[in-house]
Image: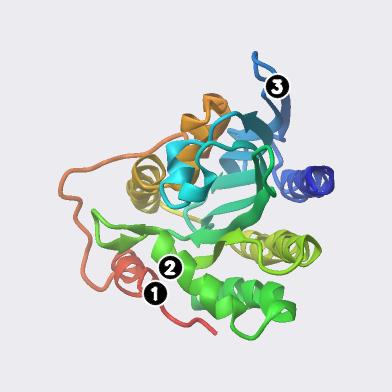
Amino acid sequence: MIEQVKKYLLNLQVDICEEFGKLDSISNFDTDIWKRDDGRGSGITRVISDGSLFEKGGVNYSIISGDKMPKSATALRPDLEGRNFTALGLSLVLHPDNPYIPTTHANLRFFIAEEVGKDPIWWFGGGFDLTPYYGFDEDAIHWHQTAKNACLPFGDNTYRNYKKWCDDYFYLSHRDEQRGIGGLFFDDLNEGSFEKCFEFLQSVGNHFIKAYLPIVEKRMNFPFTPKEKEFQLFRRGRYVEFNLIQDRGTLFGLQSGGRTESILMSLPPTVKWTYKYKIESKSAEDKLTNYFLKPKDWI
């Protein structure tokens, strides 16, 4: 199981970095191959920064193992208590410089927890989501239609269920606000055979470039003003808040002794928290929060 998933994730990492790296005329993805000192983890972190297109982006593959599941995993799954585990995954975040290009996040992961004398417990998780600063209906429709296409071979309700899960998960409860316009989110996927679940993971992964690349290409040459850049930095603050306060993946990585440098690569390079930030009524900035960030059926 582990070797099949590993091979797929490493190939996908290469594809994503090649597709988006060639759009940036200044920078490219640097490769950092690392191993944990205790021998219980390794990975390949690929990071792009200070480019013409991306202020910062990271596509990180990692595999870690341990003798005890972190609290972030066992809180919802007490049956995992006392088992050793192996976790591997690919996670990415791309922070464009241009405020008209949305930030995106994707994650694909596989866990297996074992205990002597008992059957192993395994599952898949992941998804992808979009965080615009200036919204466009056609971009949101394209994003969600591609997400639905990824789900179509796996049941009529798959997209609807995982779209709702994404809306519910990427929600800042302390702000009563969505992080973005959603996409797909799934976890604890182990119904049926390993092969069928793995096929779904691959379908989600294979549709990520199809979902994000056309939006980047359409918006990358849009002119923008200092005011629009300022709004992007303000909204990035929400992104940081979610990742550090609520994201289970960040907590799992830190609690399991993961590589902090790779875990926190998801944070944007520049961000602002402005006290009582003023948003003009009926402006494009106002439309983001009062229209685009309200969960809705885009297709």
- The residue lying furthest to the left in this view is 276
Identified at 64% across, 55% down, the residue is 123
Q: Out of 161 and 68, give the one closest to the viewer.
A: 68
Which residue is identified by label 2?
167
Circle nearer the N terminus (2, 1): 2
Dot 1: element: loop
Circle 2: residue type: Asp
Q: Out of 111 and 141, give the one closest to the viewer.
A: 111
Whether residue 66 is visible to the viewer of this picture, yes or no, is yes
Dot 3: element: strand
The CA distance from mark 1 to mark 3 is 39 Å
Q: Out of 214 and 119, give the one closest to the viewer.
A: 119
Identified at 42% across, 35% down, the residue is 270
Circle 3: residue type: Trp
Which residue is identified by label 1?
295
- In the rendered image, residue 173, in percent from the top left (x then y), is placed at 27, 57
Which residue is identified by label 3?
34
Q: Out of 149 and 22, give the one closest to the viewer.
A: 149
Residue 18 shown left or right of residue 297 in the figure: right
- The residue lying furthest to the front in this view is 117
- In the rendered image, residue 210, in percent from the top left (x then y), is placed at 72, 65
Q: Are marks 2 and 3 in contact (CB under 8 Å)?
A: no
Q: Where 6 falls versus 297 (above or below)?
A: above
Q: Which image quadrant: the C terminus?
A: bottom right
Q: Where 217 falls versus 247 (above or below)?
A: below
- In the rendered image, residue 11, in percent from the top left (x then y), is placed at 83, 46
